[in-house]
Amino acid sequence: MRPFVYAVLGTLACVLCICSHTRAQVIETDTLPSSSMAQNRWQRLTNKKNLVATGIVLNTAGILYTGYNWWWKGNYHPFSMKYEGFFNNYSLGVDKAGHFYISYLYFHTIHDVMKWAGYKPRTALWVGAAIPALYALTIEVADGYTSYHFSFDDLVSNLAGIGLGILQKEVPYAHYFKVKWSYFPSAFAPWRDASLSLSDDYDGHIYWLAVDLHNALPKKIGKYWPPFLNIAAGYGVSGASFGSQLPMERKFLLGLDYNLAHFKLKNKTLNTIKNLADFFHYPAPAWRKVGEDKATFGFPLH
């Protein structure tokens, strides 16, 4: 699940675009050049649409260049494909959940940031879908010419994440369901070159499906459920991290989740950042069951 790094870098890049524009607005009020030509140039530079478009292009180029240097450079092999088994593979499907979430998160991030910048809804929708689809296809084709192999499972998982994202923008009721991710280093978290290899620490990943019961249930029932809380089901694995000596077992969780989308902020920029933060699950009470062990209740981190 090497491309997981991409999701982190891409999301951070989009958030930085928003923050950069906010900073530019402050600078503009204090140090805007006096001449009209310089003023027009400055306004074009700090225009939200231009800022986001430039950020997406640079982020795409940076991701592909980084992928080439980290994983593909000097690793050429004849093209090959490999079926990995979806949820019956080396991580019991946690890596596939990661591929799904990566594209799902990318779609929502690009879509929401483009909407923040003032792009038309249909433009934001299709660009938001095209960019992560490009990433997924490019990565898999490039992997096909290396020792990693082209993975049909990975590509299907990525496209399914994009598909769910589109569905949530097009079907109002689908808004009440959200895929989230939480991570905390496991006891077997691998370290490489003094840095945490997050993508290999499968035991530390949990993927959640959060449901906004306040709005998803019929109004007569949903009104009794707190609007700031979701109920969430989580999935993970134990014993799959690189270097783990434990038997591999599936991990299931059921608990509460914080509904950040419920809190509306007047500031459009802060509201967009808050909405992006809602794609992550934060520690909350939950039942946790690993393999045949008895379920335990607490604030599970992984």
Image (cartoon, grey):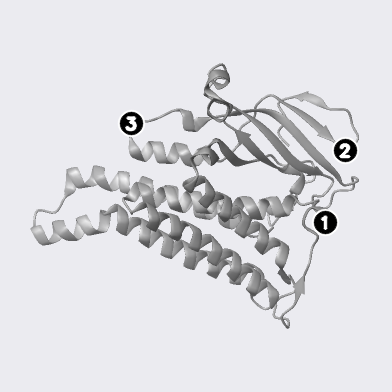
Taking the view exactly as shown, the residue that stands out farthest to the left is 35
Q: In the visual, does 97 lie left or right of 219?
A: right
Q: Nearer the viewer, residue 146 or 222?
A: 222
| Residue at image location 53% in from the left, 49% down from the top | 167
> Dot 3 surroundings within 10 Å: few (below 14), some, or many (20 or more)?
few
| Residue at image location 16% in from the left, 50% down from the top | 32
- The image position of residue 31, as x and y in percent, is 17, 48
Q: Check disc 3 and report its element: helix, strand or loop.
A: loop
Q: Nearer the viewer, residue 164 or 241?
A: 164
- CA–CA distance in space, label 2 to label 3: 46 Å
Q: Nearer the viewer, residue 61 or 101?
A: 101
The part of the image, by quadrant, that contains residue 281 is top right
User: Label 1 belongs to which residue?
Assistant: 90
Residue type at mark 2 is: Gly
- The image position of residue 274, as x and y in percent, is 45, 36
Q: Check disc 1 and report its element: helix, strand or loop.
A: loop
Residue type at mark 1 is: Tyr
Whether label 2 touches label 3, CB < 8 Å? no
Residue type at mark 3 is: Lys
Quarter in which the N terminus is drawn: bottom right
N-terminal label among 2 and 1: 1
User: Label 2 belongs to which residue?
Assistant: 291
N-terminal label among 2 and 3: 3
N-terminal label among 3 and 1: 1
User: Label 3 belongs to which residue?
Assistant: 266
